Image: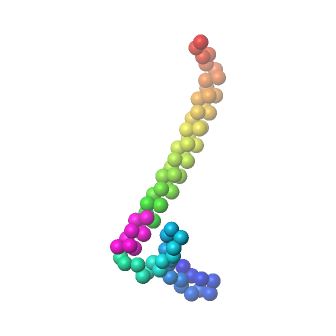
Amino acid sequence: MNDPTGKKLDPILTFEGKRYDLNALPDDLKELVRGMQVADAQLRMHEDTLKVLAVGRKTLAMQLNEKLKSVTPIE
């Protein structure tokens, strides 16, 4: 990242209210951070998929409701 003056900023990890210099962390911790980033991206992707499925299901329900208007229900 760059600050407004164009100077490159060091990446900062903020975790549970504490800040850490990401470059200064050991490699095993950097790998854990990368894993968390991948997990977060996957969660966002699947949340978006669920939203799309919910919209599709709602559309199907509206179509079903409309078509059932011409069908007499059983008693």
Please report the residue visible at 37 percent of the width from the left and 78 percent of the height from the top.
26
- Residue 24 in the image: state x and y as whole percent: 42, 82
Image height check: is 39 above or below 9? above
Q: Residue at image x 62%, y 16%?
A: 72
Compared with 63, 56 (above or below) is below
Magenta run includes residue 39: no
For the point 61% across and 26% down, the residue is 67
As drawn, 71 above or below 53: above
Task: Tell me, yes or no, whether the highlighted magenta stretch contains residue 32.
Answer: yes
**Which quarter of the figure is the N terminus placed in?**
bottom right
Q: Nearer the viewer, residue 56 or 28?
A: 28
Give the farthest residue toward the top: 75
- Could you tell me residue 52's position as x and y percent? 54, 47
Number of callouts in the render? Answer: 0
**Residue in front for this viewpoint, 12 or 55:** 12
Q: Which quadrant of the view contains residue 30?
A: bottom left
Q: In this view, does 5 lie to the left or right of 14?
A: right
> In the figure, 49 relative to 33: above or below?
above
Q: Please provide percent x and percent y for residue 39.
A: 43, 60
The extreme left residue here reads 28
Magenta stretch, overall SS: helix
Q: Where is residue 44 in the image (x, y as percent from the top left)?
A: 51, 57
Residue lying at the far front in this picture: please name it. 17
Please give the range of residues in magenta.
28-36
- The residue depicted at 39 percent of the width and 68 percent of the height is 32
Q: Quadrant of the C terminus?
A: top right
Q: How is the image coloured?
A: rainbow
